[in-house]
Amino acid sequence: MVTGSAPTASATGTAASPDALRLAVRITLAARADMLRRSLPPRPHDVRGRYEWWRSLSAEQARQATLLDHLDAMCGHLDGEPALGHSADDPLPEAALEAADGFTDEETAAMIAAFREAR
């Protein structure tokens, strides 16, 4: 599933940079998060409302809401706001790559594979 476009190796004519990969993964994760956000009931912003919202969700909706929280945290991390449990020194954590797996175009998937191999 192609979810967005970002500079890739063929678009620039050179090997893709880590920044290009981070952008491609960020676009993919944001698209997944937006899809989940649209499929769930609106989330209240206040603490009490959020608690009641969580309690009202079905098991599948709760799983999707948890994934949404994870994707939002990974997007924030890729934007420079370190996610809990991930080193601030790691600009592209494995968890972000795992969340993007299967949701990118072939070129981004190849960039991810090359990045993992070089790690």
Image: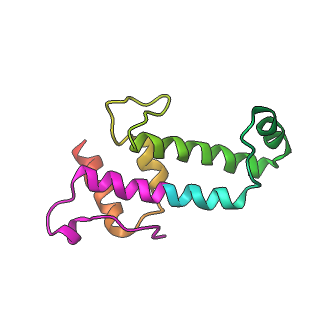
Q: Choose between 96 and 75: the one closer to the eye.
A: 75
Q: Which percent across, then down, holds residue 80?
A: 38, 38
Against 23, is 86 above or below? above
Residue extending farthest front: 46
Number of numbered discs overlaid on the protein picture: 0
Q: Choose between 77 and 92: the one closer to the eye.
A: 77
The residue that appears at 36% across and 30% down in the rendered structure is 88
Q: Which percent across, then down, holds residue 113?
A: 31, 55
Q: Which percent across, then down, holds residue 33?
A: 57, 55
Against 32, is 79 above or below? above
The residue that appears at 65% across and 56% down in the rendered structure is 37
Q: Is residue 46 magenta?
A: no
Against 18, is 119 above or below? above
Q: Which percent across, then down, holds residue 95?
A: 45, 42
The residue that appears at 61% across and 47% down in the rendered structure is 67
On the image, which quarter does residue 21 sit in? bottom left
Residue extending farthest left: 14
Against 82, is 111 above or below? below
Judging from the image, the colouring scheme is rainbow
The residue that appears at 43% across and 59% down in the rendered structure is 27
Q: Which quarter of the rendered picture does the C terminus lie within?
A: top left
What residue range appears in magenta?
1-29
- Apparent side of residue 45 relative to residue 31 in the rendered image (left or right): right
Q: Is residue 5 magenta?
A: yes
